[in-house]
Image: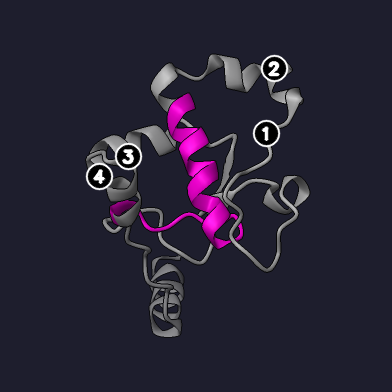
Amino acid sequence: MEIKNWSKFQHFKDRKPPWVKLYRDLLDDIEWHELDPKAAKVLVMLWLIASEDDGHIPPIKQLAFRLRMSEKDTEVCVSKLSHWLEQDDNKPISERYQDDAPETETETETERETELFRA
């Protein structure tokens, strides 16, 4: 997971800055104003944490520790920040997420044979 448009707003490539840029456009961002206070605070803290790794956010367990929150509360807060974050497509959504195995050729052939037999 990483901060959306990180490279557009932060221009440090070779170091960990002690601060992040906060743009005035945030004042007129509806999604920002619709955040509950806790999620808004977490978002600012995510920007600071992300500055340590070129916009990338650590896994939930490490993130929860850094935010001094439970893993469950962290997951809830992060889920409210989808407008501000990009999910890494290569990583599972959560540790409990399981992808179905692709269908094998044998299964497909068996289904086709069954359909032909019924016809």
Disc 1 from disc 4: Cα separation = 27 Å
Name the amino acid, label 2: Leu
Q: Secondary structure at mark 1?
A: loop
CB atoms of marks 1 and 2 within 8 Å: no
| Percent position of residue 20, x then y | 63, 43
Q: Secondary structure at mark 2?
A: helix
Q: Earlier in the sequence, mark 1 or mark 2?
A: 1
Q: Residue at x 45, y 65 (%)?
A: 119
Query: Quarter of the image holding residue 115?
Result: bottom left
**Residue identifier under label 3:** 74
Is residue 51 within the magenta segment? Answer: yes
Is residue 59 within the magenta segment? Answer: yes
**Residue identifier under label 2:** 27
**Residue identifier under label 4:** 71
**Residue identifier under label 1:** 22
Q: Residue at x 46, y 38 (%)?
A: 45
| Percent position of residue 62, x then y | 31, 56
